């Protein structure tokens, strides 16, 4: 699974972006400022960094300089406006792309995947138990046979894919589905969609291995 570093001081914006990208199959690490970002870069490996220009303890430009001095990690700037200075300065520092706020999720996703492909870091197919998920094509196969999922079923599958081995409360899943799908999903609807998804992906829906029920809490994603 590809791992992204999101450097953004607005926690509401960061939470929204992270939830959307998590729903699309990325692992997202968040830093609220320059110092925290540099600490995370020292401790972890990432496939791409998303940098806000304005930070409380510096700027995205300084983080970009730090990144490029250490290697070839791709960088996309998030700019509050499309002013020429921010765009040119970021690109001159070696940034791979930029996108203006407010961020449009689908455009951001397209830019990220494009930069990852150009950098040779694209990971288009991942495995989840007997499933193979082509993230570029939004295609799911099981034992070589394609499984046809609705848009919401697919996004729900990606939520579990991104949290393999973890226990998720129903509230956490609902929040992720709300942010990722852009539509209202209530508790009863979630139950229906999980049942439908299990029917399509589990060998035995009555004894699920990929989406297990944790009574009184929620669900646990398979390894």
Image (cartoon, rainbow, N blue to C red):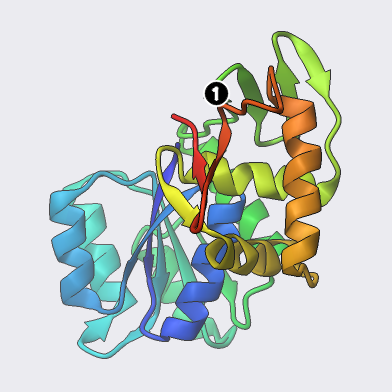
- Of residues 27 and 205, the one drawn nearer to the viewer in this rendering: 205
Is label 1 in a helix, a strand or a loop?
strand
In x, y percent, where is residue 47? 38, 44
Q: Is residue 3 left or right of residue 178?
A: left
Q: Is residue 111 left or right of residue 190?
A: left
Point 70% across, 49% down: residue:
155
Examine the image and state in which quarter residue 117 appears.
top right
Point 14% across, 63% down: residue:
39
Examine the image and state in which quarter residue 196 appears.
top right
In x, y percent, where is residue 132? 63, 22
Q: Residue furthest bottom?
A: 56
Circle count: 1
Q: Is residue 142 left or right of residue 31?
A: right
- Of residues 100 and 83, the one drawn nearer to the viewer in this rendering: 100
Where 139 sits versus 54, above or below? above
User: Dividing the image into 4 quarters, which one contains the C terminus?
Assistant: top left
Q: Residue furthest front?
A: 215
In x, y percent, where is residue 66? 19, 62
At label 1, counting other C-alpha atoms closer than 10 Å, the crowd grade (few under 14, some 14-19, many 20 or more) is some
Residue corresponding to mark 1 = 127
User: Dividing the image into 4 quarters, which one contains the N terminus?
Assistant: top left
Q: Is residue 205 left or right of residue 84?
A: right
Point 43% across, 49% down: residue:
167
Q: In this rendering, does residue 22 appear at all?
A: yes
In x, y percent, where is residue 147? 81, 24
Where 207 sits versus 197, above or below? above
Q: Residue furthest top?
A: 144
Q: In this rendering, does residue 114 appear at all?
A: no
Point 61% across, 49% down: residue:
24
């Amino acid at each position: 699974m590809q791992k992204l570093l999101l450097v953004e001081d607005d926690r509401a914006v960061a939470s929204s972006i992270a939830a959307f990208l998590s729903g699309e199959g990325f692992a997202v690490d968040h830093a609220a400022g320059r110092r925290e970002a540099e600490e995370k870069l020292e401790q972890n490996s990432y496939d791409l960094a998303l940098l806000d220009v304005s930070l409380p303890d510096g700027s995205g430009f300084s983080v970009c300089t730090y990144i490029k001095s250490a290697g070839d990690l791709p960088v996309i700037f998030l700019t509050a406006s499309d002013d020429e200075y921010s765009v040119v300065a970021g690109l001159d520092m070696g940034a791979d792309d930029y996108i203006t706020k407010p961020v449009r999720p689908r455009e951001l996703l397209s830019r990220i995947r494009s930069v990852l492909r150009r950098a040779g870091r694209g990971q288009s197919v991942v495995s989840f138990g007997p499933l193979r998920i082509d993230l570029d094509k939004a295609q799911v196969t099981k034992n070589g046979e394609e499984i046809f999922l609705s848009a919401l079923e697919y996004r729900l599958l990606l939520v579990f894919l991104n949290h393999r081995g973890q226990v998720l409360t129903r509230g956490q899943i609902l929040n992720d589905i709300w942010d990722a799908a852009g539509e209202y999903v209530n508790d009863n609807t979630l139950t229906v969609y999980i049942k439908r998804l299990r029917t399509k992906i589990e060998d035995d829906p009555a004894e699920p291995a990929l989406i297990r029920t944790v009574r009184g809490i929620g669900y646990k994603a398979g390894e």
